[in-house]
Image (spheres, rainbow, N blue to C red):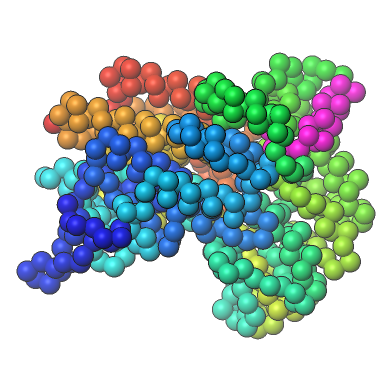
Amino acid sequence: MASLINGTAPSTEDADGRPAAETDVDVVVVGAGFAGMYLLHLLRGHGFSTQVLERGAGVGGTWYWNRYPGARCDVRSIDYSYSFDPDLEQEWEWSEKFATQPEILRYANHVADRFDLRRDIRFETGVEVAQWDEAGRRWRITTDDGTEVTARFYIMATGCLSSSKRPEVDGIDDFRGDTYHTGHWPHEGVDFTGQRVAVIGTGSSGIQSIPLIAEQAEHLTVFQRTPNFSLPSRNGLPDPDELAAIKADYPAYRDLARQSFGGAPRPLPTKGALDVGDDERRAVYQSAWDEGGLGGILASFTDLRTSQEANDTAAEFIREQIRSIVDDPEVAEILCPHDHPFGTKRPCLDTNYYATYNRSNVDLVNLRATPLVRLTESGIVTSERHYEFDAIVFATGFDAMTGAICNVDIRGVGGLELRKKWEDGPRTYLGLMVAGFPNLFTVTGPGSPSVLSNMMVSIEQHAEWITGCVVHLRGEGARAIEATVEAEDDWVEHVREVGDATLYPKANSWYMGANVPGKPRVFLPYVGGVGPYRRICDEIVADGYRGFALSH
């Protein structure tokens, strides 16, 4: 392995002047978010030489890039944290129930410092090509500066929401004011004081940023194509008594999280919404609304994910809350979702989002009624009128789950292109491996619980499974592992069947890839639950890595 100084290897050339393989390691990990950092820590602990390639200038992944106003986690801080180090668990103190982006990024940097991770991370390095070398049984990875890294194992820890989606708007280059994308926010921040600002998009990043931008801007106009269900966070200080009880027996709490449905301990409902009377049902919803957080209402009854009639009761309850908060009845109705069952698009978590539309300096434009036509030098044209702005914010989301993986030209056995294999929808075994691509692992990839769960729990489970796998291969003297076509086909069908038993496919959501023009409409995550999925993965290992082919 080449000598590394401050995470960067010296550049070399071969006899023909081409960039030579500057680093040869056991494992290359792409991405220095929470998945990449944990993988580096685990693999290093087992004696594997590991190089992490990260396109950003620092650790943190999504929390490095997404610095828009109001950015915060929608999972409670106590749950959105590593569980692998007891001292870290006890010592770190979160300041809010739902941590902000700056605090989460401080946590990521603290972990990187604590475990001396940066020395094996090459920052500001993107990956362009990864080619499986069949003769050498290694991956040859080419970075954006033309250098090459070779490794036996190649792990895509690129995150599910890390490939931002370009706005589908004509005339973007014509606008002479400032433009921003929530997924690539300036690290120094933005001051909107005295400005006329437009926000296009009302997904999670839009809903989190709109209240804060409204407080600062002279005038804010929100352009909404599709309203989303948003729930109040009821954010505040962590409950000290609850925190003390958790820290008194952290292992038991973490085990509950690992075996739970969504990756955070919560009692499972025992009744369906249609099994109780109107008064009892409404009381349950009201209690969950008052408590705040994502899990309350969606997890309040057994049938909300599977029965349209049951789901309608929750959806209408939330619409009633919107109408009670927003003063203008017409604006309230525009904000009420009717085109998808509650929960089939990831519900948003907000602080004063709906109340923001009661401000005199905030307007809402319904793009369903008056479609956006184009941007001009001075603003935005809809089918109805021209609006002038000083700044435009694109809260237009991500090419979720597959975008960051397919942004790299990955070629497996016989030069098979992953993009080509996935052109009709992603195919994986367990969301961990792909037939035809030996020694390639994906962390929280399509076909795993990933975005339907507390990502930290799913990240840790995948990182530990992958590490256990490469340790097993070393012990067996095996050089490669690959998912079989039969196992992959069976898993893809299982994921589809479980998804089709729910209401999720009814929504035009990023879960379905529906937010990206031309992307296949396939339900991407596995909806069977975190605990059941973990047991499936463990059983496959116990059965000698059933569904995988090992080669020596």
Indicate left or right for 196 with 472 as reference.
Answer: right
Residue 490 falls in image quadrant: top left
Name the foreground residue: 203 vs 338: 203
Magenta stretch: dominant secondary structure? helix
State whether residue 378 appears in this view.
yes
Describe residue 393's horizontal placement relative to residue 329 as left or right.
left
Using the image, determine if residue 229 lies above or below residue 226: above
Q: Position of residue 436 (x, y in %)?
A: 27, 40
Residue drawn at point x = 51 percent, y = 57 percent: 64
Q: Is residue 489 visible?
A: no
> How far across and down, in percent of the image, does residue 152 sit?
21, 43
Identify which residue, 158 or 514, lies in the foreground. 158
Which residue is depicted at the point 68% across and 56% down?
Answer: 70
Of residues 449 and 463, the one nearer the viewer is 463
Residue 301: percent from left, percent from top:
73, 23
Q: Residue at (26%, 60%) from the top-left corner?
A: 5
Figure check: 212 above or below 513: below
Quarter of the image for the C terminus: give it.
Answer: top left
Q: Tag count in the figure?
A: 0
> Quadrant of residue 188 in the image?
bottom right
Task: Identify the residue at horizontal 16%, vertical 66% (top origin).
Answer: 12
Q: Quadrant of residue 386?
A: bottom right
Horizontal relation, residue 10 to residue 112: left or right: left
Q: Vertical placement of 539 versus 85: above or below? A: above
Q: In the rendered view, tell whether residue 104 sits above or below residue 361.
A: above
Q: Magenta stretch containing residue 277, yes or no?
A: no
Q: What's the magenta region? A: 279-295
> Residue 161: x, y in percent?
52, 50
